Image (cartoon, coloured by chain):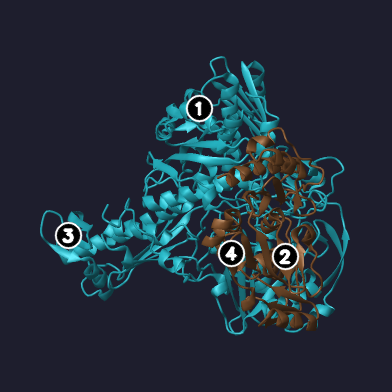
Chain colours: A brown, B cyan
Amino acid sequence: MYQTNYHRASSVDDAVKLLKSSDDGKLLAGGMTLIAAMKTRLAAPSDLIDLRHVGELKGISVAGKEVTIAAGTTHAEVAAHGELARACHAICHLASHIGDPHVRHMGTIGGSIANNDPAADYPAGLLALGATIVTNSREIAADDYFTGMFETALEEGEVVTAVKFTAPDQCGYAKFPNPASRYALTGVFVARRGGEVRVAVTGAGDDGVFRATAIEEALAGSFDPSALEGVSVSADDLMSDIHASADYRANLVVVMAKRAVAAAKG
Amino acid sequence: MGIEGIGARVARKEDRRFVTGAGRYVDDMVVPGMKHAAFVRSPHAHARIKGIDVTAAQAMPGVIAVLGGRELQADGIGNLICGWMIHSKDGSPMNMGAWSPLATETVRYVGDAVAIVVAETKGQARDAAEAVEIDYEELPAVTEAVAALEAGAPQIHPEANGNLIYDWEIGEAKAVDEAISRAAHVTRMRIVNNRLVPNAMEPRAALGHYDKAEDHYTCWTTSQNPHVARLVMSAFYNVAPENKLRVIAPDVGGGFGSKIYIYPEEIVCLWASKKSGVPVKWVADRTESFLTDAHGRDHVSEVQMAFDADNRMTALKVDTIANFGAYMSLFSSAVPTYLYATLLSGQYVIPAIHANVRAVYTNTAPVDAYRGAGRPEATYLLERIVETAARELGVPPAELRRKNFIREFPYQTPVIMNYDAGDYEASLSAAMEAADYAGFEKRRDEAKARGKLRGIGMSCYIEACGIAPSAAVGSLGAGVGLWESAEVRVNAAGTIEVLTGSHSHGQGHETTFAQLVSDRFGVGIDTVNIVHGDTDKVQMGMGTYGSRSGAVGMSAIVKALDKVEKKAKKIAAHLMEADEGDIVIENGECKVAGTDKTVPWFQVALAAYTAHNLPEGMEPGLKEGAFYDPSNFTFPAGCYICEVEVDPDTGKTEIVQFVAADDFGNIINPMIVEGQVHGGIAQGVGQALLEGTRYDPGSGQLVTASYMDYTMPRADDLPSFQVSTSNTPCPGNPLGIKGCGEAGAIGSPPAVINAITDAIGTNDLTMPATPQAVWSALKSATRH
């Protein structure tokens, strides 16, 4: 690790101020990606601004179907939240399968979506749920927020403070983990609100999380795994790497979608 | 056996310090004035070094020295050696390229060391290492052995034309070809044994300390054989004469073979300590471990097995290409020859065997012995082709094996080995019964109803441990003898120290070796200390690898115990005015058989050291040493059965049952033996399902250089193992021990792959059988 300056932010405003006054500062949420990158010398921020002690970034609130998760909430807190599980079990299930226990107790939802790793779980969940990403300056629809691999709509100095969504009628998440990293080799989140079905896929796209429209259309007709028999997705825009070819990922998208629907129907 | 003697299930003495984090490893060692090193490594797989500019690095904060290969060579430090001479079939010696501890003209793999930086802190050393400017002229690289042999492939060493190190053979080619031409059936396969990264939990490390006042060096290093390290560093690398070099291998966190070899880093740290005037410590990070620890396996073989009309094996023909990486590591040459081809008879009567092996340089990390070393490659090849032959011949796989089992011992194979004892039928029957083999079809049907493809596969392995005897291995090209030493020192008040040339890096020697003493004298294992891993304490030894600590290391202890027992009995007989032949030692007492006369053990020891009342002419003291040179290899064997369920939608394999029935000869501590089998199977399952080392063929970059991309087996990848033993004592050593350290890694990969190919109905599957690989094989499968 290269030398860096550490700052503990007391508030979101304080964090923004510190970020602006540093040469090449980085916000530190859970650090599950950033610290590892620094240790292997792949990242070298001049300053680290630690958000972990900012009170306003903590907590989950559930009011009927309206859910708000503050950005600094850890995966373990999401996974274990009883009220949230009753409103939207699939998001708790998703959080419970991120990384390992150490990662789940350090990593945060805000850190995950600010980084937008193309194989992270939360982007699929938030995109399928039609969530809103709240920042210190505005609210951004998930459809507009995830703009590509490690790319988001966040602007310089903009900090994710919370995500909010309306719990759908039914939702489910199924992930096929990369055998080595246990990130999603392909993860599919499905959410149904009345006749509308949203399906988001992580781990498979060559430009990050995306909505699988062919699957959405098939499921809008009948929200059942059987509706996906014979449905295929094109491998054209899917990722190919040492772990999985685009063809294999295309297969997994359909298989995981079926399993996500089965999970949603409980 | 006593509660702590031979055969007792004693908890490991050493585990208290290991599980409480109190072990002392090289990185825990601190010497006054110690500084930290980082190595400058090649980012290219193959390049010419046009210039090295250290000016900027030397000016960095905290930097004490920046040293390169030219200075090393000027000081007379030698090139690395390979300790086993292999001759090609035309009689010519192997073509070995030069390996300088620090590259001066050419770098040959990503990670090749070029310079060392010594600085006040580790961070400063790494910062400065990045500031060393090296002007490289990139050269074309080749990473796969088959490609490296092709015409026009990049030439890696001038000494090895066409990258061929040797072209070696064993067995009778003519007899094999004739048998194949007469055969009723021939099974043919191309078999790939995937390259593995060892991934010991503790990375390699070295602390070199030159003491100017004494003109003496001390090297703390992560070694499986510190005495061999001292011998090689003295005799070949000119670091220092043996009497001026002490090598200490303290607690070592796993080796699996990768810590047998003497690497550039420990040589350079010792040299750099003298050069810079400070003790120099280097500890690899995980990336360096991936890049530079000697890798394992990496064979490509064409195999033919011939049968007569009665399904008896008549011949085996093997043509293997072995990837050696960029340099010949210390024992690399022996692995695909005498540790591999000599085991190709397996458990079977095969009248004619011929193997041809070509060893090849590539622009990858050096390859050497890794848990099993040659024997997993032989077993995988043989057990895959036997299983395939059974399918082609339409006979049950167990029946084909049974028909061809060796049943009389000793048995001389056509490939050097002379098997001394075994009962292959016993292991096969035990495994099939434990696995409820007969009930498999019902389980397959039940799985099918759940949408899963269930398969079963077996593997009947044999291996050879305790490479020996010394004269025999010498005649085959070994540069060292493969005996072991021991010294048993009874202290004046009766506690005992056992000094051994074996080295424990996880095997539990502090417990099992103490059990031998407990068994002999009836003393508690807490009164016995095992001393190892320090060339100043133990005079000489050959270390631990090849499952040799039991069969060879403990046999040496037995010999020393015999001598101690003999002298102790003489003293006891003298003290009790009895006949020496009537003395028995048990429960910590020397007794006169058939009487109530006893002398406590400690009083015998005390008598030896007070020397007030010893038999006429006896020297004081109670301390004896012994060297033990085995008369033969030992031959552990067994049968493993694996049952899997494949998810046809994703290709994911779940191991639902794994049975191991082993013959290890006599067992000192069943719990430790079971632990060795569990660990070995975990590594074997890792090779079969998960671990695939990938270099980018164009750039030669190691793509799988972290746990994000290299899959280590984890608890949830593995089932609960059902292990058992049915033992035939080894006739060749005093304890009847065969060895158990590598069997799991040797026997398990073919069982796993045989099970998966049974489930998916195609043989076209290479390791690791990742979900994608199985899904792809399934897609293109036609049911066999």
Image quadrant holding the C terminus of chain A, namely: top right
Q: Which mark is residue A62?
A: 4
Q: Position of residue B242 (x, y in %)?
A: 58, 69
Label 4 to label 1, Cα distance in Å? 47 Å
Disc 2 marks a residue whose amino acid type is Ile
Which residue occupies the foreground of this view, B68 or A212?
A212
In the rendered image of this protein, does residue B184 appear above or below residue B782? above
Residue B445 is labelled as: 1
| Residue found 72% across the figure and 68% down from its top | A134
Badge 3 local density, few (<14 within 10 Å), some, or many (20+)? many
Q: Is residue B301 visible?
A: no
Q: How much space separates mark 2 and mark 4, taking CA atoms?
A: 16 Å
Specify whether disc 3 shares its chain with disc 4: no
Q: Amino acid at mark 1?
A: Asp
Q: How many marks?
A: 4
Disc 1 and disc 2 in contact, CB within 8 angstroms: no
Mark-to-mark CA distance, 3 and 4: 80 Å
Q: Nearer the viewer, mark 4 or mark 1?
A: 4
Q: Give the foreground label among 2 and 3.
A: 2
Chain of the residue displaying label 1: B
